[in-house]
Image (cartoon, helix red, strand yellow):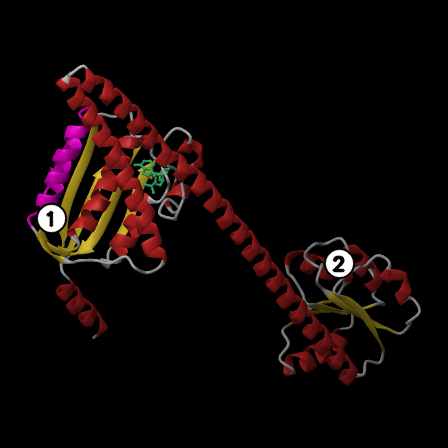
């Protein structure tokens, strides 16, 4: 937008008319003081400034706005009878540009100058945008690199921990075997088995990540009874986590068309997190519900919870909440994989959480694809 500043209304009217005819947006001020007020509130590409005005003259206005950050990019064209005085103000004003036109104004020259300033303004804006985008891109690279390094270091540590335990238990196993202590052999074998299972899950997650990256995560969808799967997982998780009570709050009787193993993986991930991030709580609530053609499933814990800013990000690859990452082991990839699985079932995944009170992770997927297709068709008509 252009601001015309002149104390003579007839000058303002004629200039405004010409500029508007040439598709420029125009604002006006009839004194230096009024111009300053407007420049404080609004950004202008160009100010056409009469030098000789009663009260604050054009030079004083230019000096005054030289300090405004809002006017950093603004160019000024002075309308002046005396060109010599122009040097006086250039020292105070470093801006998008300065020029002058002597009165009486040659309208063609003024238009030419206005168009040139506008072009320069557009070009510098485009350059600035490009520079910002480039800077962001570089930062985003840098950030991806940092996350990758961090991930490799955490992943190596996570893989090493069960490996070290396995090595230790095998040594102890040998001793128990020498002593023919079959009961201890059995207990230690069980512990080795647990650690092997941990390793297996970690490696499976790492493989899933690379499959997602290369678009090779495949799904084998069939009909299966959803609640049967939930009860089975709850029973197994209850056995290995006797310290917490896993309560099935609500059940559904429904056949669902999905990849059973992948849905199992999501449910286990939700429940494992619910146990891990609620170390002092006694209960976990599981619930399934039917809403139209959709199945909604949720796992609720009463643990550490999280603030809203993290709730958006925890489904991102490698994202772990920094404040608690030292306290809880993990790779920050489980929820990312869950999101991919649910989205590939045309579903949605999410979390409701209150910091310090707990979290409820949920997903919603269509019971079967045929009905969903009918729904989409109906919506279209
Ligand atoms: P991991 O638990 O291995 O770090 P996830 O992808 O499963 O990876 O979870 C990502 C992050 O989300 C976790 O690091 C943790 O900060 C947060 N988070 C996940 N589940 C919960 C939960 N139930 N309560 C609080 N924070 C959670």
Vertical comparison of 83 with 279: above or below: below
Vertical comparison of 370 with 251: above or below: below
- Front-most of residues 229 and 75: 229
Q: Which residue is mark 2?
A: 33
Mark nearer the viewer, 2 or 1: 1
User: Mark 2 to mark 1: distance in Å?
Assistant: 73 Å
Q: Is residue 142 magenta?
A: no
Q: Is residue 120 left or right of residue 143?
A: right
Vertical comparison of 18 with 77: above or below: below
Of callouts 2 and 1, which one flags the residue occurring earlier in the amino acid sequence?
Answer: 2
| Whether label 2 touches label 1, CB < 8 Å | no
Residue extending farthest left: 253
Label number found at residue 226 = 1
Q: Secondary structure at mark 2?
A: helix
Q: Residue at x 74, y 67 (%)?
A: 75
Q: Quadrant of the C terminus?
A: bottom left
Q: Quadrant of the N terminus?
A: bottom right
**Percent coordinates x, y for residue 325 in the rendering:** 41, 33
- Front-most of residues 182 and 361: 182
Quarter of the image where one finds residue 59 = bottom right
- Front-most of residues 228 and 43: 228
Q: Is residue 290 left or right of residue 96?
A: left
Q: Secondary structure at mark 1?
A: helix
Q: Is mark 2 within 8 Å of ligand 1?
A: no
Magenta stretch bounds:
228-253
Vertical comparison of 175 with 220: above or below: above
Q: Is residue 83 left or right of residue 176?
A: right
For label 2, count other residues whose C-alpha is less than 10 Å away and answer few (under 14), some (14-19) or many (20+): some
Q: Residue at x 41, y 43 (%)?
A: 319
Residue extending farthest bottom: 108
Q: Is residue 297 left or right of residue 42?
A: left
């Amino acid at each position: 937008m252009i601001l015309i500043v002149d104390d003579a209304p007839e000058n303002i009217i004629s200039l405004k008319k010409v500029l508007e005819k040439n598709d420029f947006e125009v604002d006006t001020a009839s004194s230096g003081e009024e111009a300053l007020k407007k420049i404080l509130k609004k950004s202008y590409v160009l100010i056409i400034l009469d030098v000789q005005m009663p009260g604050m003259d054009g030079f004083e206005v230019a000096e005054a706005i030289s300090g405004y950050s809002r006017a950093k990019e603004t160019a000024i064209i002075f309308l002046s009878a005396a060109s010599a005085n122009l040097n006086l103000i250039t020292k105070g004003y470093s801006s998008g540009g300065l020029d002058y036109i002597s009165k009486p104004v040659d309208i063609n020259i003024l238009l030419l100058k206005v168009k040139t300033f506008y072009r320069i303004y557009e070009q510098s804006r485009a350059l600035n945008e490009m520079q910002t985008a480039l800077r962001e891109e570089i930062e985003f690279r840098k950030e991806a690199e940092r996350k990758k390094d961090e991930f490799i270091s955490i992943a190596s540590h996570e893989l090493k921990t069960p490996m070290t335990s396995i090595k230790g238990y095998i040594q102890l196993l040998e001793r128990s075997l020498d002593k023919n202590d079959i009961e201890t052999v059995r207990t230690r074998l069980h512990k080795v088995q647990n650690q092997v299972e941990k390793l297996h899950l970690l490696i499976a997650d790492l493989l899933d990540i690379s499959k997602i990256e290369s678009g090779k995560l495949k799904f084998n969808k069939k009909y299966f009874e959803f609640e049967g799967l939930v009860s089975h997982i709850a029973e197994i998780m209850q056995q290995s986590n006797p310290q917490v009570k896993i309560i099935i709050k609500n059940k559904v009787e429904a056949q669902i068309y999905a990849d059973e193993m992948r849905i199992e993986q999501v449910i286990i991930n939700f429940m494992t997190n619910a146990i891990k991030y609620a170390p002092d709580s006694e209960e976990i609530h599981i619930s399934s519900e039917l809403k139209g053609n959709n199945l909604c499933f949720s796992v609720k814990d009463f643990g550490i919870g999280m603030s809203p800013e993290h709730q958006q990000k925890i489904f991102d690859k490698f994202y772990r909440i920094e404040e608690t990452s030292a306290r809880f082991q993990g790779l920050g990839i489980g929820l990312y994989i869950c999101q991919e699985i649910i989205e590939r079932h045309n579903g949605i995944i999410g979390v409701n959480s209150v910091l310090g009170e707990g979290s409820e992770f949920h997903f919603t997927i269509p019971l079967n694809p045929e009905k969903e297709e009918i729904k989409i068709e109906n919506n279209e008509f």
